[in-house]
Image (cartoon, rainbow, N blue to C red):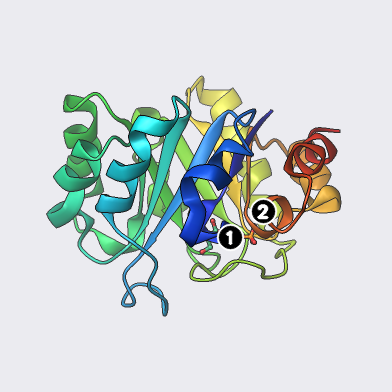
Amino acid sequence: MKIAPSILSADFSRLKDDIATVSSAEWLHIDVMDGHFVPNLSFGAPIIRALRPHTRQVFDTHLMIENPAKYLDDFIAAGSDHITFHVETVVDPGKLVERLHDAGVKAGMSMKPATPIEAIEAYLSTLDVVLVMSVEPGFGGQAFMPESLEKIRQLRDIRDREGYHFEIVVDGGINKQTAKQCVDAGADVLVAGSYVFGSTDREASMRALRR
Ligand code: DX5
Ligand code: ZN
């Protein structure tokens, strides 16, 4: 099981120091919001570029933006190791996956809570990451939606049955209790923003998630 702290809940005035407090996490989750696809703005590729020299952690970029195709090269060049985009935002998702793979970047797709797995099913054999949103995307600190557990279970079943390789990532409302439910349902990676960065002892909070 991997942990991916979401820097959305970090202190933006001291990001470099804040990410150093979660250096034992396997991935760093980077939430990009455009104020259109989601009703909130966060930051763009320059922040990723600025952080890149300061850690060797996997940069797991989560694009919550309209028209990700237009900005893909910026997020690749900034140093993302993974890029996950929302299936709701693109006409030809397969083409974006190809562009990411051509650039040597791992490709992820995500869907909002109301979007069914069928929307991404045709691409599952090509994906490295499937990100299940367990809150409405846009804000940190929301309550976990239990219906996402069924999505995780279904994805796990499909992967086992078909022999696919994607990692199942769950994002939103993760705490000690929901972490266990998600791992039991079959999640491989837990994204946690407020639970980790809201704690004064980040290592202890991540240990609690792993338990
Ligand atoms: C929400 C983001 C999440 C967010 C999670 O739109 O995609 O990554 O940071 O925050 P918590 O863990 O506080 O729910
Ligand atoms: Zn996210």
- Type of the residue with mark 2: Phe
Q: Which residue is mark 1?
A: 9
**Res. 210 visible in picture:** yes
Q: Residue at x 48, y 28 (%)?
A: 57
Counting residues from the start of the chain, the first of labels 1 and 2 encountered is: 1
Q: Image quadrant of residue 187?
A: top right
**Which labelled disc corresponds to residue 197?**
2
Figure check: 109 above or below 203:
below
Q: Residue at x 19, y 37 (%)?
A: 77
- Residue 210's spot in the image, x, y percent? 79, 33
Task: Say whether residue 17 is left or right of residue 148.
Answer: left
Mark 1 touching mark 2, by CB under 8 A?
Answer: yes
108 vs 33, nearest the viewer: 33
- Type of the residue with mark 1: Ser
Dot 1 beta carbon under 8 Å from ligand 1: yes
- Residue 40's spot in the image, x, y percent? 42, 76
- Residue 184's spot in the image, x, y percent? 80, 37
Q: Residues within 10 Å of mark 1 (few under 14, many from 20)?
A: some
Q: Secondary structure at mark 2?
A: helix
Q: Secondary structure at mark 1?
A: helix
185 vs 62, nearest the viewer: 62
